Amino acid sequence: MPEKTIKDLGVALKERRKERKLTQENLSDMTGISKRHIAKIENGIANASFEIVSILAKCLDISIDQIIFSDLEETEEYVKRLAIKLSLCTEEQRQITIKILNSILDEFQIINIKSKDEDQK
């Protein structure tokens, strides 16, 4: 799994565990997964197997989609707000906004590619 996904997985599991008012020890007792391994997963240190993620998801009553795509809901909210704002614009304003957004996103992609290239050196 990519590093960001591992960290996002850990954050999502930790948040859900806390929502359920469980300690790592409680979760360990319920799942048979060591407290130490749960801590490593929550801190984004350990790459959990699908089996472990499935056990934790079932115990925490959360879907695997919610765990893996935890940031998707936030992204969807941004898109909805942007769509509302764009709907209030003229067609010309929308086209200009889209061009600006595309330029920004293209620049981010260039930065990410350069960053990955530097990391591989």
Image (tube, grey):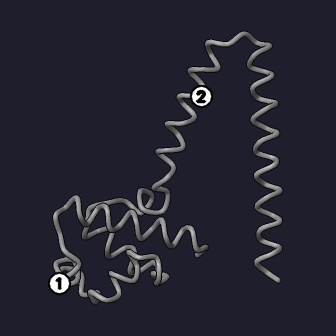
Give the residue at mark 1. Answer: 29
Give coordinates of residue 19: x percent, y percent: 22, 58
Question: Left or right: 13 with respect to 115?
Answer: left
Residue at 80% over, 21% down: 95
- Gap between marks 2 and 1 measured at Cα: 45 Å
Q: Quadrant of the N terminus?
A: bottom right
- Residue found at the far top of this picture: 90
Residue at 74% over, 19% down: 94
User: How many numbered marks appear?
Assistant: 2
Would you identify the image quadrant in which residue 59 lies?
A: bottom left
Disc 1 residue crowd, few under 14, some 14–19, many 20+, Cα 10 Å: few
Dot 1: what SS? helix
Give the residue at mark 2. Answer: 82
Q: Quadrant of the C terminus?
A: bottom right
Question: Left or right: 59 with respect to 87?
Answer: left
Give coordinates of residue 18: x percent, y percent: 23, 63
Disc 2 residue crowd, few under 14, some 14–19, many 20+, Cα 10 Å: few
Q: Amino acid at mark 2?
A: Leu
Residue at 59% over, 28% down: 82
Residue at 31% over, 61% down: 15
Q: Amino acid at mark 1?
A: Asp
Dot 2: what SS? helix
Using the image, determine if residue 29 lies above or below residue 16. below
Question: Could you tell which of marks 2 and 1 lies nearer the N-terminus?
Answer: 1
Question: Left or right: 17 with respect to 40?
Answer: left
Give coordinates of residue 77: x percent, y percent: 49, 36
Name the mark nearer the viewer: 2 or 1: 2
Relative to the observer, which residue lies in front, 53 or 20?
20
